[in-house]
Each structure stands twice: as structure tokens, then as C-alpha cells.
Amino acid sequence: MCGMPQQPPVRSSPPRPSRPDASMSLLTNVMDHSLDDGYAEAAARKKAEGAGGMPKTVRAKLGLAAGLVLAALVVTVGAANARIAAPVVAKERQELIDRIERQTTAADKLESNVDTLRADVSARQRQALKKSGGEQADLVSVLSGATDVHGPGVKLVVNDAKEASTGGDGNPRETSGFSDTGRVRDRDMQRVVNGLWESGAEAIAINGQRLTALSAIRAAGDAILVDNKPLVPPYTVLAVGDGQRLSTRFQNSADGLYLHALQENYGIRTSISVEDDVRLSAAPSVIVRTAQPSTEKGTS
């Protein structure tokens, strides 16, 4: 049987898959051919030419030796200068320390003299007050804060909130320049002191600072100043007077209710207690600028 010769089947080979990173030929080339090959080739070429290694000629060796000697000389001179300068620096430091200690001692001595003179002035003022005050000298000295006092009274402690918070918009405490409504302010202590005076207190002190008719309670930043002396919380207010009556009248007064509102609304901590014996020191000095002792024996 004769037939047409059959052609072998044609098998087409499948296309070669492309590399996933074919689109990143530049990065692939950098990764496959690092610069280390170039450095290695340059080093091999220099070695073949005899340029690598130690210098071969006498002149080159002398130049290298001179460079090493110069470097050693620079290091040696620097070390010597540092060693020479070290005692000078130490001496200047010690002189500065001695000067600070001398000035500190002098300042402490001056402060002690100021305290002594202040005590002497206060004693002389009290003596003059007794001479000019007649029968009411003791009462005047108590009311002016010129003498130590003690007696029944109250102890009022005012402290900042445990966690100070920031007031919202339109808060009257924030509009006065304070953002932290949990802090006791100078105006709060002013109202407390005025409320105690109005309730019958005869003598008042805040954190041991005796108040007089010339005392001022102000603020410097977040600190409360009493007669320009900064105080830190808690603020302990001691007041001499009829203890139970003074406590009741103060808590029922407008200033006492104001303090209670601070406690309820802002978390300011307060406590008041009646004391059997409250002791207050005299004010450091009572400076009278305008008043003069009266020469009249009495008025009708």
C-alpha cells in the first residue's frame, strides 16, 4: 500500500519564562556586579605594576619614616601640653570653689545679721508701741501682729486637688490666666482670710507667716506669696478666736460657702477643726510709714 509520506510532528518548544525581576534590570545589575569586583581588579593591577605594599626606593622609605616621626612628635607635644595645662585647670577650679565658699559664707553672715537687726527692730517697735499705746498697748500689739499670741481658735487646711484638671471654655477660673482649676489660687486664700477676719478672728497666720494690716496675698506664676514670701501647699491657716463660734460663722459665711464650692466643683481639699490652743509667732517686722502716735489722752 502506497501512501503519502508522513511528516514528523512538529513540537514547538514552550517559551522561556522571563525572570520576575526583568523590569528591574538596573537594580539586578548592581546586585549581581558589586563594586568589590572593581576594587579587586584595581588592587590586582596595582600589585602587578608594583605600586602596592611597602615603598621600594630609599627615598620613599625616608619619606614614610619622616611622616611617622612627625606624627609621633605631634602626639607627644599634645600630650605634654595637656599634662602641663592640667595643674593650671585644677588650680583655677579650686580657686573658683574657694571663692564660691567664701561668698556663700559671707552671704550667710549677712543674712544672719539681717535677721538679728530685724528682731531688734521688732523689739524696739513693740517697746515703742507699749509706751504710746497706754492701757490698750497689748491689744494694739496683738491686732498689729507685733507680738506672739496664743489662745483657742481654728485650724483650716486648704490643699490642691489630687489630680489637677483643665477647665473648659468660658470657665471663670480659666479666664483669669490659670488653666489648672485644681490649684488653689491667691484670690481663694484672700477670700479665706477675709472670711476668717469677718467671722471674728483676732490673729491669723498662713504656713507660719503672720498676717498684719499691711499683709498682701498675691501670686507669682503658680506660687502664692504672702508678704512676698512664697508658700507651698498644703496651706495651713491658723486663726485665734472663739473656736467653735469662729468655725461655725466662717462655714456659714459667703467665703466659707465659696470654699465649699471649690471643694465640690474642683476637688480642692479642705478641712477645718476647732483647736484649744493656737500659737502664732509675731510678724518679722511691722513697718509703719504714715501713722503717728496720738498725743491726745482721750476723746469724748
Image (cartoon, grey):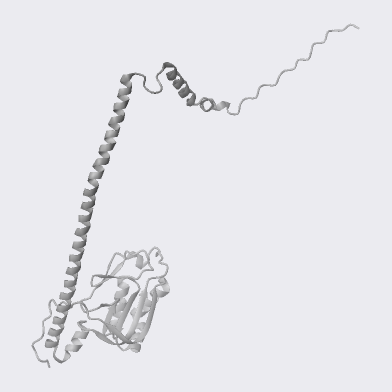
Quadrant placement of the C terminus: bottom left
| Quadrant housing residue 199 | bottom left
Which residue is painted at 78% across and 15% down in the image?
Answer: 9
Residue 178 lies, in percent from the top left, at 34, 64
Which residue is painted at 70% across and 21% down in the image?
Answer: 14
Vertical placement of residue 67 versus 142, above or below: above
Farthest top residue?
Answer: 2
Vertical placement of residue 82 versus 180, above or below: above
**Who is closer to the viewer here, 281 or 158?**
281
Residue 81 lies, in percent from the top left, at 24, 41
In the displayed structure image, the side of residue 165 where residue 147 appears, left or right: left
| Quadrant housing residue 206 | bottom left
Answer yes or no: is residue 258 visible: no
Farthest front residue?
Answer: 58
Residue 226 lies, in percent from the top left, at 26, 73
Which residue is painted at 16% across and 81% down in the image?
Answer: 123
Quadrant placement of the N terminus: top right
Which residue is painted at 36% across and 69% down in the image?
Answer: 183
In the displayed structure image, the side of residue 233 where residue 139 appears, left or right: left
Residue 192 lies, in percent from the top left, at 32, 78
Answer yes or no: is residue 274 visible: yes
| Quadrant housing residue 147 | bottom left
